[in-house]
Image (cartoon, rainbow, N blue to C red):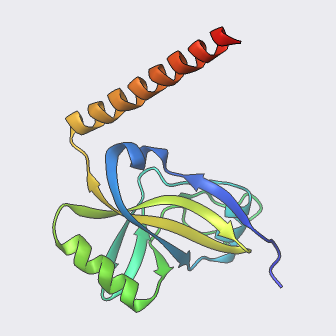
Amino acid sequence: MPREIGEKVVSTNRKARHDYLIEETYEAGMVLSGTEVKSLRAGRASLVDGYAFIENGEIWLDAVHIQEYVAGTWTNHPPRRKRKLLMHKQEIIKISHKTKEGGYTLVPLRLYFKNGNAKVEIAVAKGKKEYDKRQTLRERQDKRESDRAISARNNLGD
């Protein structure tokens, strides 16, 4: 029986959705050492510079910062190291074909615990150009203004 039931989000990469156009998302397990798990349970992780890559038919997560465990001693882990991700072979092959097309990369979106197991949500994404980012911000601002106008008009009728 798992220690925890449900999902507990440890870290999210909000900037990834701003910088990349997300095509597909996948869930992967992670191979972690004991102090890394304890540090994650304390909520000490950052996905800001993280990326994933495929090497020799295996998928790896690199540059994700999991802070050293405070009560750890000589058994502590290095904060930024390559971590192996656990996925089905067919999924890895599918992702590999997609990233070889060109312009696509693998970006971690969330780090979380699902039923007691550490998971990472990775996305096959394409980098946005500067004008795409401005267009997205403009659309979001226009939607927010129209929602405000609609709610203000509804409030006047009351």
Q: Position of residue 113 (x, y in %)?
A: 67, 67
Residue depicted at x 32% and y 50%: 20
Can you say which quadrant of the picture contains the C terminus?
A: top right
Q: Is residue 129 above or below residue 22?
A: above
Q: Residue 64: in sight, yes or no? A: no
Q: Quadrant of residue 1?
A: bottom right
Q: How many marks?
A: 0
Q: Position of residue 130 (x, y in %)?
A: 22, 36
Residue depicted at x 59% and y 20%: 151
Q: Is residue 43 above or below residue 36?
A: above
Q: Residue furthest front?
A: 157
Q: Residue furthest top?
A: 156
Q: Is residue 59 above or below residue 125?
A: below
Q: In the picture provided, is 97 more to the left or to the right than 152? A: left
Q: Residue 126: in sight, yes or no? A: yes
Q: In the picture provided, is 139 more to the left or to the right than 119? A: left
Q: Position of residue 33 (x, y in %)?
A: 63, 77
Q: Quadrant of residue 101?
A: bottom left
